[in-house]
Image (spheres, rainbow, N blue to C red):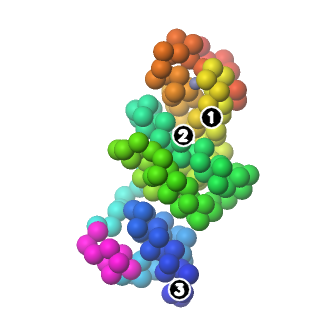
């Protein structure tokens, strides 16, 4: 089925750089139709393939972690409590646009990565925690010890104090 609404959503996702698989997932359009829309609307923009980006950022830069946190905070503002239980693709798109408007270039979070953050928040594999030192919310995950540390403090002179979020799992020494 190739409804106008599905095509419109596909175009809006592709315009933000979404990979075809994600577009298929949210529009129920076939791979062929998505490719067709991409080719007709965006010329020879190459399709993205391979696995979705990972949020396991034990090697990720602090700037990247700040960008991810910015997206996550905005997404919670837009999506409210719903973000715990579902991925609302309209909210992901709206939030991504706000993120693009606010973030300092270079833009660190791709649309695919923004979607993965939304998925991880829904699955509670990542969460927003408030830093006990600077009181700013940041995205925290279980995947590596460093993602449980506040990137804003880590970057600043407060580094020696190293705020751990309120909901961080205890016991780890620094
Ligand atoms: Zn902090």
Q: CA distance from mark 3 to mark 2?
A: 34 Å
Which residue is found at the position 63% from the left and 20% from the top? Answer: 133
Q: Position of residue 73 (x, y in %)?
A: 60, 44
Which residue is found at the position 50% from the left and 78% from the top? Answer: 8
Is 43 a magenta residue? yes
Which residue is found at the position 58% from the left and 35% from the top? Answer: 138
Q: CA distance from mark 3 to mark 1?
A: 38 Å
155 left or right, relative to 131: left
Is 145 a magenta residue? no
The residue singled out by tag 2 in the image is 69
Q: Nearer the viewer, residue 24 or 158?
A: 158
Q: Is mark 3 within 8 Å of ligand 1?
A: no
Q: Earlier in the sequence, mark 3 or mark 2?
A: 3
76 left or right, relative to 71: right
129 left or right, relative to 43: right
Q: Is residue 1 above or below residue 161?
A: below
Q: Is residue 127 above or below residue 34?
A: above
Q: Is residue 21 visible?
A: no
Which residue is found at the position 39% from the left and 80% from the top? Answer: 37
Q: Earlier in the sequence, mark 1 or mark 2?
A: 2
Pointer 1 and pointer 2: residues touching (CB < 8 Å)?
yes
Q: Is mark 2 within 8 Å of ligand 1?
A: no
Q: Quadrant of residue 85?
A: bottom right
Q: Position of residue 23 (x, y in %)?
A: 48, 70
The residue singled out by tag 1 in the image is 137
* Region rendered in magenta: 37-45
Q: CA distance from mark 1 to mark 2?
A: 7 Å
Using the image, tell me which numbered label, if any, was put on residue 4: 3
Q: Is residue 63 above or below residue 161?
A: below
Q: Residue furthest top?
A: 160
């Amino acid at each position: 089925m190739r409804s106008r609404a599905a095509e419109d959503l596909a175009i809006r996702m592709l315009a933000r750089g979404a990979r075809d698989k994600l577009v298929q997932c949210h529009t129920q359009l076939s791979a062929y139709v998505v490719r067709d829309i991409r080719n007709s609307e965006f010329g020879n923009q190459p399709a993205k393939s391979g696995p979705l980006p990972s949020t396991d950022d034990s090697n990720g830069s602090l700037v990247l972690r700040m960008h991810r946190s910015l997206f996550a905070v905005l997404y919670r503002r837009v999506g409210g409590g719903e973000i715990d239980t579902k991925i609302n693709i309209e909210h992901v798109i709206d939030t991504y646009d706000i993120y693009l408007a606010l973030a300092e270039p270079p833009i660190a979070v791709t649309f695919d990565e923004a979607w993965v953050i939304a998925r991880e928040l829904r699955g509670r594999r990542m969460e927003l925690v408030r830093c006990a030192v600077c009181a700013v919310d940041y995205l925290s995950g279980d995947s590596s010890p460093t993602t449980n540390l506040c990137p804003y403090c880590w970057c600043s002179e407060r580094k020696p104090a190293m705020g751990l979020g309120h909901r961080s799992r205890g016991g780890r020494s620094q």
